[in-house]
Amino acid sequence: MAHEELQRRIEASFAQQGLMRVIEARIAEVRPGRCVIEAPFRKTMTQQHGFLHAGVLTTLADNACGYATLSLLPAGQEVLTAELKVNFLRPARGMLAIARAEVLKPGRTLTVARAEVWMRGEDGAEVLCAAMQATLVPSVAI
Amino acid sequence: MAHEELQRRIEASFAQQGLMRVIEARIAEVRPGRCVIEAPFRKTMTQQHGFLHAGVLTTLADNACGYATLSLLPAGQEVLTAELKVNFLRPARGMLAIARAEVLKPGRTLTVARAEVWMRGEDGAEVLCAAMQATLVPSVAI
Amino acid sequence: MAHEELQRRIEASFAQQGLMRVIEARIAEVRPGRCVIEAPFRKTMTQQHGFLHAGVLTTLADNACGYATLSLLPAGQEVLTAELKVNFLRPARGMLAIARAEVLKPGRTLTVARAEVWMRGEDGAEVLCAAMQATLVPSVAI
Amino acid sequence: MAHEELQRRIEASFAQQGLMRVIEARIAEVRPGRCVIEAPFRKTMTQQHGFLHAGVLTTLADNACGYATLSLLPAGQEVLTAELKVNFLRPARGMLAIARAEVLKPGRTLTVARAEVWMRGEDGAEVLCAAMQATLVPSVAI
């Protein structure tokens, strides 16, 4: 699939996700088997200590895994997350959350992907804050 | 710990979570080792097919596990999620998401909890949509 | 499916697993959506502190999930484990390991099951030592 | 810690694991934050289709994660697995199973490690068969 078509297809799916607008997330990069999604730190997205909420990190990583998977499928297919597991490694403070996902094993029935979420600080340095391993299911469009 | 004090303490922590206001979540019930958190279905919280986003289900279940754990700790302690694993069982449609968590094994270093997220429809019937197993770490307040 | 036929089918599959003989495991119970597998404590099955190895607990729980899933499928089908997650809750000491599994959500493409592994001591008391949540894939016989 | 001392310490712990002898596993390599464990394919270690059992792959990967973690701790400390999650990517056929683990985030309370299990065939080619993400707890020797 041509790169522009891939990007268009994934941006179209992304735009339909109400939650992505709330989180102010955007697709920073997508190429076959990989996807990077970014979102700014917002006070509305925190847990009780003022760090970015584990649920937000999970949402970004899950979506990055989903679009990394979708990037390998023919047009007209969709992806659902069957399950995910995520370890939270450090408190998520900083300016920008960056979820980078990669397909580990593509498949017709199941795809396995991994993602890491990094927090970028004011100085530009990045800290690894979460690591995900997820199982996704290609499906026909609903 | 007296029940009202427990409720007050957990409501206070909950109120500090910016994300809970965005999701319009509320604590429906808390007692030692258990917690129920609810949130209404909102179009702003959906994924690309119009179902409640996996990230929202995960957030609710994670928080329910966290407060079920906190309910067993002495005042002045906090809880962090070390890791979580969640299976998405059915599309999350309906009026209300209900995350019910229970501590499986409390511990000084680690606590293991399980949660289930149900979607309640207009007819009041509930459907199981997600199942979580998580590891939490009691910590002193940050 | 009649209960004897179910039992026969699952015993036949079990007998083909070389590893189950090594562990001296046996199916203690099987009924639709549930399976219990037991294995004696053996010094050959330990980790470095003399407890039953996490890998043995995982093997028993994984197999119990597999046969709980298989019990709901028509004859001629098989089951593969797509992924599993297991928390180790307490050191596994005692006389007998008992893995009890239950299907949480059956499905044509994916089944989700949970298992718990208990250790029974000389006094007959049981202690919960591990909790699993797994995703299984029904498949045609290979 | 000098490399020979590290190797000696880990070999000593490994030798105490009854299960490792049964599986005929050996430590192929250990250096700070990394460990490789190998085991031959044996008919006694199979599941019902004649592939290496998921429980064996899990055991090897779990142990590799454990010793990768131990390699970063001072002498006199031990490691326990708190939880693990493993995806099974392909049927495990071949001559030799090779579990390669790496510490993703070391910590005083919790360490997170990842492992991959490869099967090497007669032609020397390797196939990725399982991927693990695990949480480990450093502890004083029991």
Image (tube, coloured by chain):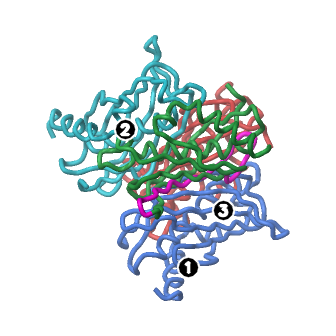
Chain colours: A red, B blue, C green, D cyan
Residue pointed to by mark 1:
B31
- Amino acid type, label 2: Leu
Q: Nearer the viewer, mark 1 or mark 3?
A: 1
Q: Are the residues flagged by discs 1 and 2 from a single subunit?
A: no
Q: Nearer the viewer, mark 3 or mark 2?
A: 2
Does the magenta-highlighted stretch encompass residue C122? yes
Position of A2 with respect to B110 (left or right) is right
Residue B76 higher or lower than A9, as above or below:
below
Residue D79 higher or lower than C121, as above or below:
above
Image coordinates for residue D7, horizontal then vertical, percent = 21, 34
Within-10-Å neighbours for mark 3: few <14, some 14–19, many 20+: many
Question: Who is closer to the viewer here, B24 or A12?
Answer: B24
Does the magenta-highlighted stretch encompass residue A54? no
Image coordinates for residue B116, horizontal then vertical, percent = 63, 62
Within-10-Å neighbours for mark 2: few <14, some 14–19, many 20+: many
Residue pointed to by mark 2:
D19
Residue B72 higher or lower than C57, as above or below:
below
Which residue ends up furthest to the top in the rendered image? D123
Chain letter behind tag 1? B
Mark 1 and mark 2 residues within 8 Å of each other at the beta carbon: no
* Residue A100 visible to an observer of this rendering: no
Quarter of the image with the C terminus of chain B is: bottom left
Q: CA distance from mark 1 to mark 2?
A: 42 Å
Residue shown at 54%/26% (left/top)?
A: D51
Position of A51 with respect to B34 (left or right) is left
Q: Secondary structure at mark 2?
A: helix
Start-end of magenta stretch: C103-123
* Residue D30 visible to an observer of this rendering: yes
Q: CA distance from mark 1 to mark 3?
A: 18 Å
Residue pointed to by mark 3:
B117
Question: Who is closer to the viewer here, D27 or C50?
Answer: C50
